[in-house]
């Protein structure tokens, strides 16, 4: 009976198989032998240690700090050097080796200035031996196939030979030296050192999760994006600053105005002009003409000491010009989308232009700036003809900027508003809650959404706002939704009662400037609230974590990034210089490997030159560690589930071969 039942189960499963898929699979594995070999290989892979994941958030254009953290693997490369050499190398030699791995090209050029002849040759040999040892340590937990794929093509064969345990070679030291002598003799030592170092960096950071906000504040978001596009395994959970740039790339004028205003405020207009090639001369001309006699003191910019005073003055005028345009454009969006429930953020019509005051929530405030030459009191949200022409040109520049469009498409292709990956729920901000800790119901269109469903519908419309070409109504609504995601109190990646931009410029009252946080940030400390969120996203409440950013962790005031007994981690540690006084550090990296979770805080990166010349490094300190009870294997991960599915498909293919349903291609 057991045998008959098994036959029935197999028959039933075979009836439900997609034979077209199996036939397609058979072209890749045309024989029983090839399918069987792949099953054996995949089963072996399932028992390897899980990949190493790195989580970062709120990079905000701080490319030097971030890229160095990537190069040193958040301190992991120093650990690999320690594991490889222990006490056999001095501290100085270990620092020198680490600097070589981080910046191989620059370090080699530095050594070529300091050494020559036999001394340089000896340095090459010693360095190559040490690099191979670190590379072996870094690749130990991966399959040969995965390691091979990480090799640069020019040196793939020789690297595989040097890293393999070649039992045919009796005198391995001599064998290695002969290889190294040849590399040095044909003047390829520098290129080979670069290849090994890059391989080590790749193996140490297997997968990178960027939990929002690559853009704004810092000087190099475009540099970060260029680098991320070279990585094999990276994903994004969009932050509000990312989404406003995505909206700007779609041509949404209110998003464009926000992007330019923030760039002006943080004195980063170079990002737009030099990084993306967006010409801002028309804006400068308009601002200089319109605000010629206006000091624009309320629109100061974050300029460095020694900055050109005339440039600072022009930037302040540009700052004010685009801010006024932004308030007008946002008022237009709010008027055409009453379901956004943001009428309280339309403030221009509440100004008494004769008295220089504004009434908000029944209280009258004096304005710090009363010069509004482009605002018509009778129709305050209408752009002047000059402003309309300016925005028309800027919209075309953003839409036709190839580099920006390439970066934004990468964000859409590799990103989402949230991600469930290896028992971790990743999102940038929060889940909108009411005061009781339950999901707040939010109107989007003519329906209400909450929790995961709110994330899903917002992402749906954001994609429509960028990609939709046939349905103009959905396309327009999607673009407005990207602005909504940027600034609405019900946006899960904004999570504040209001964006008090106008109040911060024009009203000297801290109370009216306050941006109250969502109830989430207080209630997430409660186990039942965290569990409710995890359950809503289909996660196991016993083994899963919530990992987010967005709100800088005030470590200098004793705040911990770890909430709810370790179930929740907020990892905004101040990559952005603007927040380092608040956080007291210069960024967090959360590392999740086969042994468990480790949260690492970082000191401030000085300079590449300091690392190369003085062999300094960013000081990194483990904040908290959560060890797994047993070492996690690939079979326990998302990738493991995909491998298991493939094994099942291959076993179905084997059955089809052996049953004669599909014929082998001998």
Image: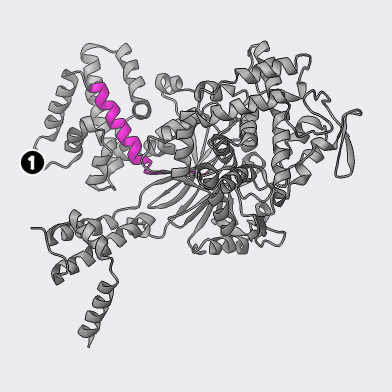
Give the secondary structure at mark 1.
loop
Q: Which residues are magenta?
A: 189-211
Q: Does the magenta segment cover residue 424?
A: no
Residue at horizontal 92%, vertical 29%? 355
Which percent across, then down, holds residue 269?
59, 23
> Horizontally, is 546 left or right of 613 in the view?
right
Which percent across, then down, holds residue 215?
55, 34
| Occupied quadrant, residue 363 | top right
Which percent across, then down, holds residue 429?
60, 48
Of all residues, the one furthest to the bottom in this rendering is 1
> Horizontally, is 521 left or right of 533 in the view?
right
**For residue 580, above or below residue 551:** above
Residue at horizontal 80%, vertical 25%? 372
How is the rendered protein coloured?
one colour
Asked if residue 62 can be seen in this view, the reply is yes
Which percent across, then down, holds residue 322?
68, 27
Query: What is the quadrant of the C terminus in the image?
Result: bottom left
Query: What is the quadrant of the N terminus in the image?
Result: bottom left
| Occupied quadrant, residue 494 | top right
Residue at horizontal 18%, vertical 23%? 183
Camera-side residue: 50 or 241? 241
Camera-side residue: 431 or 147? 431
Which residue is identified by label 1?
168
The secondary structure that most of the magenta stretch takes on is helix
């Amino acid at each position: 009976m057991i045998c008959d039942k098994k036959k029935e189960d197999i028959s039933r499963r075979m009836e439900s198989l997609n034979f077209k898929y199996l036939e397609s699979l058979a072209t890749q594995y045309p024989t029983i032998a090839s399918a069987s070999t792949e099953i054996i290989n995949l089963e072996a892979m399932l028992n390897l240690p899980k990949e190493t994941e790195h989580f970062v958030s709120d990079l905000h254009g701080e490319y030097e700090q971030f890229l160095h953290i990537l190069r040193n693997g958040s301190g992991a490369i120093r650990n690999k050097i320690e594991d490889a050499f222990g006490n056999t190398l001095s501290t100085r030699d270990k620092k020198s080796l680490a600097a070589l791995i981080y910046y191989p090209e620059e370090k080699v050029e530095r050594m070529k200035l300091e050494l020559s002849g036999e001394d340089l040759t000896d340095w090459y040999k010693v360095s190559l031996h040490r690099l191979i040892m670190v590379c072996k340590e870094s690749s130990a937990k991966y399959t040969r196939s995965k390691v091979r794929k990480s090799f640069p093509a020019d040196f793939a064969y020789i690297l595989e030979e040097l890293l393999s345990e070649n039992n045919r070679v009796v005198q391995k030291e001599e064998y290695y030296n002969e290889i190294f002598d040849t590399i040095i003799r044909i003047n390829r030592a520098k290129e080979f050192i670069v290849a090994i170092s890059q391989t080590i960096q790749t193996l140490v950071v297997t997968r990178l999760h960027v939990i929002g906000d690559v853009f704004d504040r810092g000087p190099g978001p475009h540099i970060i994006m260029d680098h991320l596009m070279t990585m094999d395994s990276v994903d994004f959970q969009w932050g509000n600053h990312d989404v406003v740039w995505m909206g700007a790339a779609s041509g949404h004028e209110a998003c464009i105005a926000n992007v330019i205003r923030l760039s002006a405020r943080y004195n980063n207009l170079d990002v737009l002009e030099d990084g993306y090639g967006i010409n801002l001369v028309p804006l400068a001309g308009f601002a200089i003409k319109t605000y010629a006699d206006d000091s624009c003191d309320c629109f100061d910019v974050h300029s460095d000491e020694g900055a050109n005073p005339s440039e600072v003055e022009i930037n302040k005028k540009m700052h004010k010009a685009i801010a006024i345009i932004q308030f007008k454009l946002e008022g237009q969006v709010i008027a055409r989308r009453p379901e956004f429930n943001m009428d309280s953020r339309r403030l221009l019509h509440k100004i008494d232009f004769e008295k220089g005051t504004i009434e908000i929530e029944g209280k009258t405030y004096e304005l710090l700036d009363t010069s509004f030459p482009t605002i018509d009191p009778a129709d305050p949200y209408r752009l002047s003809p000059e402003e309309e022409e300016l925005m028309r040109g800027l919209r075309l520049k953003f839409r036709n900027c190839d580099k920006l469009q390439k970066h934004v498409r990468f964000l859409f292709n590799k990103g989402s508003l949230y991600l469930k990956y290896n028992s971790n729920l990743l999102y940038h901000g929060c889940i909108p809650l009411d005061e009781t800790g339950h999901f707040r119901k939010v109107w989007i269109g003519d329906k209400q959404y909450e929790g995961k469903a709110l994330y899903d519908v917002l992402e749906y419309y954001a994609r429509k706002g960028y990609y939709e070409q046939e349905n103009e109504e959905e396309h327009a609504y999607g673009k407005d939704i990207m602005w909504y995601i940027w600034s609405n109190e019900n946006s899960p990646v904004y999570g504040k009662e209001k964006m008090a931009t106008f109040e911060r410029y024009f009203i000297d009252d801290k109370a009216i400037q306050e941006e109250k946080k969502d109830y989430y940030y207080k209630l997430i400390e409660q186990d039942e609230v965290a569990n409710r969120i995890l359950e809503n996203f289909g996660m196991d409440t016993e083994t899963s974590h919530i990992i987010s950013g967005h709100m800088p962790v005030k470590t200098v005031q004793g705040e911990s990034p770890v909430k709810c007994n370790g179930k929740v981690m907020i990892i905004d540690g101040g990559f952005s210089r603007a927040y380092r006084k608040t956080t007291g550090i210069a960024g967090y990296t959360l590392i999740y490997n086969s042994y468990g979770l480790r949260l690492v805080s970082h000191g401030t990166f000085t300079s590449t030159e300091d690392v190369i010349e003085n062999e300094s490094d960013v000081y990194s300190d483990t904040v908290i560690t959560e060890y797994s009870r047993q070492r996690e294997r690939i079979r326990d991960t998302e990738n493991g589930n995909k491998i298991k599915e493939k094994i099942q498909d291959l076993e179905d293919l084997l059955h089809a071969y052996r049953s004669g349903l599909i014929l082998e291609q001998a």
